[in-house]
Amino acid sequence: MKNRIIENSLKTTVKEKPFSIILLFIAIILGIFMQLVPPQILKNIIDNNISKGIYQGIWKLSYYYLIAVLISGFADFIREFMMADIGQDILLNIRYNMGKKLSYLPISYFSNNPIGQVISRFTSDVDAVGSLFTSGIIGMIADSLKAVGIIVSIYLLSPVLSLYVFLLIPILYFIAKFFKNSTLKAQIETRKAVGNINGFIQELFNGIRTVKIFGMEKHFISDFQQPLNENINAVHKTSIFDSVFPCLMQIIRALIISITVIIAAPKGLGALGISIGAIAAVIDLISRILAPIESIAMEFQTIQEAVAGVKRIQSFASEDEEKRYSDDAAIIKKYENLSISVNNVAFSYSKDDEIIKNISFAVEPGQKTVLVGRTGAGKSTILNLIAGLYKPDEGSIEIGGMDPFKMNPNIRRRIMGIVPQSFPVYDVSVRDAVTLYDETISEEQVEEAARIVGLHDDIIKLPNGYNTIIGEGETGLSNGQYQLLSLACALVLNPPILLLDEVTSGLDGVTEERVFKALKNISKGRTIITISHRVSGIIDADKVIILDSGKIVEEGTPIDLAGKNGWYAKYSQIEQLGWKI
Ligand code: ATP
Ligand code: MG
């Protein structure tokens, strides 16, 4: 689907809504044609009836006039409605295709791109592109045709007047453009100010503890004044432009009409020799030309913005997707006795900053390995590489001979239980948080996993037990409970390998003991790689790997390392003094 998001979305819409599209074009053409009919009828009424004093048949003409106005209004309604309908469908398809694309992008895309930017690709950029296909291009074509039709009609009534109107068009256009641009600028300022207000509230939510602890309420309120002022200034500007523009257009319209009358009146300056009925028709036509010209000024702006949006969406569409899943179900029949080997692996999140530098180690089946190191040493990164979330820049990782990066997610889950350092806060039921919508997992398996991590008793106390929806704005769990839940999620398929990133960091002493006990029970016969800041948690490990700045500085059994006067010994000493590293 590379780089063809917009094209494909348009094709889908054409396939889904052919009748709407046909109807739209019929409505546009009918609308343009019907605009031109009433002035002609008006001319006839005045010239053939009113001015000659013949009133026979006038009702019939008035009736036609009314019908023409009604059809023209109805055609406009259909046009607007179909445009909105088709436009929304295009937007939906573009967003759907972008969402699909996003979910297939490699995890590195998510760490290299700020979330706000990605969100605006999905919101304002898509909106801009949508308006290109609705009000933008179609609107511009429809309005231009309308304007041309009106000029031609005037020409048929009086070539001189059509020239005069033709000369007025650029003046009208630039006045309209000036106002529309200024309004748009003010609207953008308003949006920015609203964004700032939102940001402030969000910040308060995130930092409320800090605000309360340090008594910073006054400081917050005085800072809050600024985006509020910006907002009100911007809104003022918009309302000034909004209220001045229609008045100005009314005045201009009146001026143009009076000049027309002066030029065209039979006994006036110009004496163009056209009938009163024709003058009335021209006045009507001139009133009708203002709206399309105003719209064209706006549509130019829309198209410019849309082109920028199209470019940004196309650059999003050309991001490389991850094509990684090989069919390894055929390769492995048993998910047991899988050894892990990390061979000369180097990795960086961004090009110039190598986080993991040429690391090699092996973990035999059933072995328990602990990665130890200071904050930022690269422990979580190594675990994520083994879990197959990232692809190493150099070297290779193998789990039972397979590349974890290419592993099919279904198989991955059965091979590895992964507990990340920062657990996600979902908005799902407790059961779904454990199964992750895998329907092959039975209720018994979910309960069993919850029991193993010691969470079952807490869950049944929740309002709806396993069906309780947890998450932001719903029933909350404590940090420790969330951590246990993600442990249960990792364990539920009984995988032979566990990758645990500081699973006990969010827990109190008693719970920590409980989890350690649970881990000891489930660790029998499993291959485990854990991460720990604490030496005490790793005493019963088979192997300890000490990392510093992305390199292995020491490696061995706890007993081996305890003897050396190296990192491990230092860590143990510090910890015995009661410090946590
Ligand atoms: P901690 O004990 O604090 O969890 P860690 O050893 O697990 O630390 P990592 O999370 O592996 O450390 O991070 C190692 C380095 O990689 C850090 O310097 C960090 O800034 C960088 N890093 C981690 N995650 C990302 C990311 N998603 N994008 C860019 N850089 C990252
Ligand atoms: Mg970490």
Image: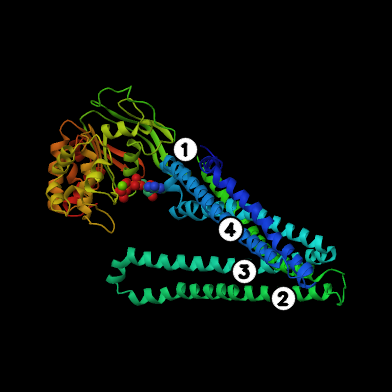
- Give the numbered dot on residue 182: 3
Circle 2 crowding by C-alpha within 10 Å: few under 14, some 14–19, many from 20:
some
Can you tell which quarter of the image residue 495 is in? Answer: top left
- Mark 3 / mark 2, whichever is N-terminal: 3
| Number of numbered discs | 4
Q: Nearer the viewer, mark 2 or mark 4?
A: 4
- Give the numbered dot on residue 74: 4
Q: Is residue 80 visible?
A: yes
Whole-number angstrom distance, CA of label 2 to CA of label 4: 27 Å
Reading the image, the residue beneath label 1 is 321
Find out whether the residues at labels 2 and 4 contact each other: C-beta distance under 8 Å: no
Question: Residue drawn at (67%, 74%), measured in percent from left and top?
Answer: 250
Choose between 261 and 557: the one closer to the eye.
261
Q: Is residue 310 left or right of residue 149?
A: left
Find out whether the residues at labels 3 and 2 contact each other: C-beta distance under 8 Å: no
Question: Residue drawn at (53%, 39%), measured in percent from left and top?
Answer: 15
- Mark 1 / mark 2, whichever is N-terminal: 2
Q: Secondary structure at mark 4?
A: helix
Q: Nearer the viewer, mark 4 or mark 3?
A: 4
- Mark 1 / mark 3, whichever is N-terminal: 3
Choose between 425 and 169: the one closer to the eye.
169
Whole-number angstrom distance, CA of label 1 to CA of label 4: 47 Å
The amino acid marked with disc number 1 is Glu
Residue 68: x %, y % from top left:
65, 60
Q: Is residue 574 visible?
A: no
Q: Nearer the viewer, mark 3 or mark 2?
A: 2
Q: Secondary structure at mark 1?
A: loop
- Mark 4 / mark 3, whichever is N-terminal: 4
Reading the image, the residue beneath label 2 is 254
Whole-number angstrom distance, CA of label 4 to CA of label 3: 32 Å
